Image (cartoon, rainbow, N blue to C red):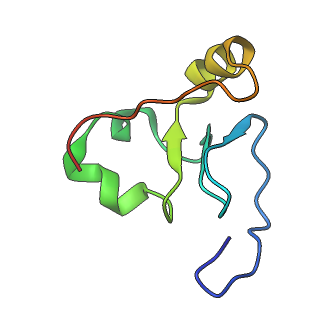
Amino acid sequence: MKKNGEPYKSYVPQADNLTDDGIFIHSAPWVQASVFGNPSQRYNHGSNGCINVPPKDMVKLYQKTTVDEPVIIYGQG
């Protein structure tokens, strides 16, 4: 959801819902590969709370996860 409560109009081929209020871990084909894993670029190309993942990695993750599978997120930022 956008900050004003409206849904985004973007389509992503793989998305796993993490929270009840619309936070997802999802494929981000619009983000350049050099941005992923680069903390100095993350804020310029990030999302509004979602976790952006390179498309090829998200395909693998999406295929391996199941409903109600726990997700642990760690790291800085």
Q: Is residue 18 above or below residue 22?
A: above
Residue at the spot 62% in from the left edge and 19% down from the top edge: 61
Q: Is residue 52 above or below residue 57?
A: below
Say whether residue 28 is left or right of residue 49.
right
Give the total of numbered labels.
0
Quarter holding residue 76: top left
Say whether residue 42 is left or right of residue 56.
left
**Residue 24 placed where, x, y %?**
62, 48
Q: Nearer the viewer, residue 40 or 67?
A: 67
Q: Quadrant of the N terminus?
A: bottom right
Residue at the spot 32% in from the left edge and 51% down from the top edge: 42
Q: Nearer the viewer, residue 1 or 30?
A: 1
Say whether residue 74 is left or right of residue 70.
left
Q: Nearer the viewer, residue 12 or 68?
A: 68
Residue at the spot 68% in from the left edge and 58% down from the top edge: 20
Residue at the spot 50% in from the left edge and 65% down from the top edge: 48
**Residue 58 placed where, x, y %?**
62, 25
Quarter holding residue 59: top right
Quarter holding residue 65: top right
**Residue 63 placed where, x, y %?**
74, 14
